[in-house]
Amino acid sequence: MISSFSTRSLTAPLRRLRWIFAVGFAVLGDWLFYGHCLGMSLALFLVALAAVVPVTNAVRLRGRELVAAGALLTVGILPLMESSGLLSVVFAAVGLALFAVVLTGSLAQGWAQTLSAARRLLLAGPLRLAFDLTAEFRQRIGGPVGIPVQFLLGWAVPVSLAGVFAALFASANPLIDGWLDAISWSALLAEVSVGRLLLWLALMAATWPFLAIRLPRNAVRPDPRPGGPNPEDSVRPVVGQAFDAATIRRCLVMFNLLFAVQSILDALYLWGGIALPRGMTYAAYAHRGAYPLIVTALLAAAFVLITMGPGGPGERSATIRGLVYLWIAQTVLLVVSAILRLDLYVATYSLTLVRTAAFVWMGLVAVGLILIVARIALRCSNAWLIGANGLTLATVLYACAFCNFGAFISVYNLAHSREITGTGGPFDVQYAMSFGPQAIPAIDRYLAGPTGPLDRRVASWRSSSAAQHAAAMTAWRAWTFRDWRLQRYLAQHQATPVDAPPVFNEPGIR
């Protein structure tokens, strides 16, 4: 493993190689990113950076680390090939960080230390450029940095003299004078804008921690001895004073009764279809309770975590464990009711990106509650619970990185709109158009309906969006699989359709 970094402990060629690659990646990033949209360009940049990591860090490649690191990098970059959204960029960066720390040997200390090292590499790593550059200056001039006068003079003198000689040669040689006159100095200076300089600086800061990886020499591990310190032990005295067994039992009995009332009301009005009081609609009933019920479920989960710690009074009592299981079951039912409430609201007011995220969030809360039951039943630690929830969250977000939510929401709203079903609300075409070209398949189906041909504004938007997408696809740097699938759809549907097949059978919508 690579230990703590010091410029003096490195050979001069390796130090020089790192700085050359740092400047080289700034130039490569300028060519790939400046003035262009992200896409395949970012994937190529990250793969190139990953290929250089073993070289600049003098890593001795081993089979196990190489296979694990390569798999993590591949998994991280795959979402970026599908789409260049925020989630895809985050997963690609995490995949590269895990690749780097695994390749340099942190996997031997366990996955917890590997993830911690990757987190430090991403969050604190970019700040190291200034410190390491200062250390490099200090070593170059052989003393405190201050203002590196010697270093500046060491370059200013030869550059100035070279300029003088170039001017003399230009006055004496017409060929050299013609070459210098042919250079458009004003155009070169115009290309070097403040934004471009900031991009170069950001690229160097982002790539430098991967070129000069610094990991702690010794990882901090939990004490494996049975009597060793446990972080949860410091919490137990406080919990024991505030929540003894009797207090926890009373709380759970009251909570179960309150939750039972809410569950019965939801069963009657949401599941049973009983008419609501006069003046209240199902949409209003659903919208009012969807999000507060999720907050209630989170508070319930927090109470269980605090009072049911390993070895605490709550965990030792069979009665309390039974009440907890009953309460969590009611809480899961509460989450299901919240999902149903949101579904009723969506049926009336259509689906949006925020409401889609709410569905995903509610599902995660339900899984988290089930994991709490597993922690209590299996007598696992809170660290296990945090890890299990983190893995669940990462899996769901990873799947979301491949989802074309704009196209899905547009198709869903159209399929459940008045224009298609004859009931419900009208299709919000303005909201669909806000998703950009990915909504074109749904817009085509809308234009093929009875009211679509009358909406010339939407038809004009469709034509201009298709043309813009076709023009954007000529730039290979921004290429993604999602945009390629849409391009294939547009090639098959070049004109605004008159008749269209059922909306869910359209190619390119998925």
Image: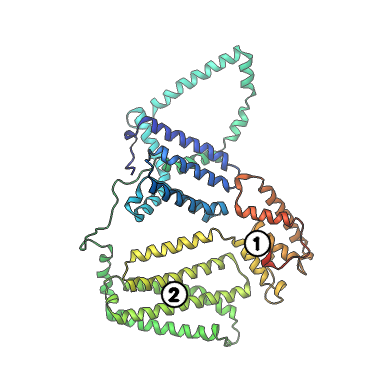
- The quarter of the displayed image where residue 136 is located: top left
Query: Is residue 77 visible to the viewer in this orientation of the structure?
Result: yes
* Image quadrant where one finds the C terminus: bottom right
Counting from the top left corner in percent of width and height, residue 126 is at: 43, 44
Q: Is 454 positioned to the left or the right of 244 in the image? A: right
Q: Residue at x 55, y 17 (%)?
A: 166
Q: Quadrant of residue 302?
A: bottom left
Q: Residue furthest front?
A: 63
Element marked by disc 1: loop
Residue 488 circle label = none
Rendered image: mark on residue 296: 2
Q: Which residue is mark 1?
A: 509
Q: Looking at the image, which residue sits at the far top?
A: 172
Q: Amino acid at mark 1?
A: Ile
Residue 233 rendering spot, x and y as whole percentages = 25, 66
> What residue is shown at x 29% (from left), y 80% (from top)?
318
Split into 4 quadrants, where in the image is the N terminus? top left
What residue sits 28% from the left and 53% below the top?
220
- Neighbor class of circle 1 (other Cα within 10 Å; few <14, some 14-19, many 20+) is many
Residue type marked 2: Thr
Q: Is residue 45 above or below residue 281?
A: above
